[in-house]
Image (cartoon, helix red, strand yellow):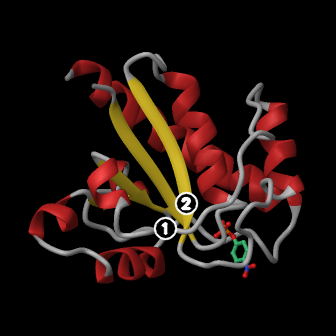
């Protein structure tokens, strides 16, 4: 059985598609599944934001095949680890947890680098390309740490 990891943000078009693409690029796909979802419904079925696609492409990662989907309760059964981008995502996802086991799966992704400091990956949607590049750098570092841990297990 593969280990399954879900990346979650609000729209599932800017941050979590990048996180999905970056982590997937670091793990063997015969042993791991990486996916992403949003807590908001606006972009269901849509490809990632052009600025995320561009940032990923510059770094050799293709995320054009991804399509937006909504986070749902059954993802707690489907996934082993759920990484959220900011504290609002955390609250929205935790609200849907059914028990402690569900809650234990959810972690702020930058907790990986700054444990206990509640650092958000800033939402770049209303920003510029440079904001997407900054998000990429943060996610690259966090995913490197996540991948190292997962591969050690
Ligand atoms: P994301 O960014 O959560 O990183 O995908 C957003 C994308 C779209 C919206 C908000 C945030 N929106 O309000 O449509």
Is residue 103 shown above or below 36? Answer: below
Residue plotted at (32% across, 79% down): 96
Quadrant of ligand 1 in image = bottom right
Which callout, 2 or 1, points at the residue further toward the start of the chain? Answer: 2
Q: Position of residue 18 (x, y in %)?
A: 65, 47
Q: Which quadrant: the C terminus?
A: top left
Q: Which quadrant: the N terminus?
A: top left
Is residue 25 shown above or below 93? Answer: above
* Horizontal side of residue 92 vs 103, given as left or right: right
Residue plotted at (73% across, 68% down): 124
Question: Does the beta carbon at disc 2 come under 8 Å from ligand 1?
Answer: no
Residue plotted at (83% across, 57% down): 130
Q: Position of residue 102 (x, y in %)?
A: 20, 64
- SS of the residue at dot 1? loop
The crowding category of the residue bearing disc 1, from other C-alpha atoms within 10 Å (few below 14, some 14 to 19, many at least 20), is many
Instruction: Report the residue marked by disc 2.
Output: 37
View extreme (left): residue: 100
138 or 90, nearer to the observer:
90
The crowding category of the residue bearing disc 2, from other C-alpha atoms within 10 Å (few below 14, some 14 to 19, many at least 20), is many
Q: Position of residue 131 (x, y in %)?
A: 77, 61
Residue plotted at (45% across, 33% down): 33
* Horizontal side of residue 75 vs 22, given as left or right: left
Distance (Cα) linking label 2 and label 1? 5 Å
- SS of the residue at dot 2? strand
Q: Are marks 2 and 1 in contact (CB under 8 Å)?
A: yes
- Residue 10: name its quadrant: bottom right
* Horizontal side of residue 127 vs 123, given as left or right: right
Instruction: Report the residue marked by disc 1.
Output: 71
* Horizontal side of residue 1 vs 14, given as left or right: left
Q: Position of residue 51 (x, y in %)?
A: 86, 54
View extreme (front): residue: 74
């Amino acid at each position: 059985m593969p280990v399954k990891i879900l990346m979650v943000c609000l729209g599932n078009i800017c941050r979590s598609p990048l996180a999905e693409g970056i982590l997937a690029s670091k793990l063997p796909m015969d042993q791991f599944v990486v996916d992403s979802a949003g807590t908001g419904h606006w972009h269901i079925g849509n490809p990632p934001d052009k600025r995320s696609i561009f940032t990923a492409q510059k770094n050799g990662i293709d995320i054009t095949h991804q399509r937006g989907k909504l986070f749902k309760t059954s993802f707690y059964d489907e996934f082993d680890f759920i990484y959220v981008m900011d504290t609002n995502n955390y609250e929205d996802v935790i609200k849907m947890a059914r028990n402690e086991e569900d809650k234990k799966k959810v972690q702020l992704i930058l907790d990986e680098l700054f444990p206990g400091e509640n650092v958000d990956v800033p939402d770049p949607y209303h920003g510029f390309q440079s904001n997407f590049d900054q998000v990429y750098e943060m996610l690259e570092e966090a995913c490197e740490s996540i991948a190292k841990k997962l591969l050690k297990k």
